[in-house]
Image (cartoon, rainbow, N blue to C red):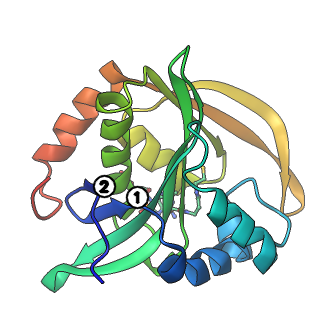
Amino acid sequence: MELPVFLRGKKTIQRPVNKETDFELLWQGVNDPAVIHFTMGYLPRTKEQQEEWINKIGKDDKDVHFAVEAVEAGAKRTLIGIMGIHRINWVDRNAHTGAMIVRKDYWGKGYGTDAKMCLIEYAFNTLNLHKLCSNVFDFNKRSLNYSLKCGYKKEGLRRQQAFVNGSYCDIIELGLLREDWEPALAKYRESDDVDSY
Ligand SMILES: CC(C)(COP(=O)(O)OP(=O)(O)OC[C@H]1O[C@@H](n2cnc3c(N)ncnc32)[C@H](O)[C@@H]1OP(=O)(O)O)[C@@H](O)C(=O)NCCC(=O)NCCS
């Protein structure tokens, strides 16, 4: 069965999470220390916990989850991770964005930026959100760089807020308004980073 395409970028698509095809990779990812080292996760997740999490997707209007697929030569689609809009506040119209590309061999190749641009467009132009936020560990240069590339601005620094791999690190608080994102999107659309947007 061909899985649906909900958001389409230059080199990624996003679609609803599909338990049958996505469970294994996502479960491996949330238990991979090299991945969760960059996220706020630090406890092992059992199969039962992961099932509970995946079964809850789509049942809460404060969270939107997408499975992210890389689209490669010959239109080959490969599941690489997950991205989402979380803690949506429908009054203030703000939310947090999150991403986890669990396929480490796909890091640093522009897939995150491409998918994030689509996610932001959906957040602003479909959900009519006003502001997006994201928190990044100071050592997570990939996440910081791709967020800045999408237009996020540094708004705050929580000093020594998290303990990761034996030492404290700062958490950088990022925020994105439509006016920050639009020039970043225009620049991205003009870039020659393959295909059409
Ligand atoms: C964060 C994440 C979603 C970014 O996606 P990605 O596809 O790797 O990011 P991109 O390739 O689109 O962009 C990464 C940027 O960082 C740069 N970069 C890549 N590796 C880097 C490194 N080791 N140090 C510094 N910068 C680096 C890239 O050059 C690129 O910037 P540029 O486009 O201006 O050149 C992905 O790496 C990921 O899921 N990591 C693990 C989990 C995680 O960190 N989640 C986010 C928690 S806040």
Amino acid at dot 2: Asp
Query: Percent position (x, y) of residue 153?
Result: 47, 27
Binning the other alpha carbons within 10 Å of mark 1 as few (below 14), some (14 to 19) or many (20 upward) gives many
Q: CA distance from mark 1 to mark 2?
A: 5 Å
Rendering quarter of residue 75: bottom left
| Vertical comparison of 122 with 146: above or below | above
For the residues labelled 1 and 2, say whether their Cβ atoms are less than 8 Å apart: yes
Seen at 32% across and 45% down, the residue is 117
Answer yes or no: disc 2 within 8 Å of ligand 1.
Answer: yes
Amino acid at dot 1: Gly
Residue 37 in sight here: no
Q: SS of the residue at dot 1?
A: helix
Binning the other alpha carbons within 10 Å of mark 2 as few (below 14), some (14 to 19) or many (20 upward) gives many
On screen, residue 13 versus residue 55, left or right, reads left
Seen at 38% across and 31% down, the residue is 127
Seen at 73% across and 65% down, the residue is 52
Closer-to-camera residue (32/6): 6
Residue 118 in sight here: yes
On screen, residue 32 versus residue 121, left or right, reads right
* Residue carrying label 1: 112
* Residue 27, label in figure: none
Rendering quarter of residue 46: bottom right
Query: Percent position (x, y) of residue 164?
Result: 82, 57
On screen, residue 111 versus residue 39, left or right, reads left
Closer-to-camera residue (58/136): 58
Q: Which image quarter holds the N terminus?
A: bottom left
* Residue carrying label 2: 114
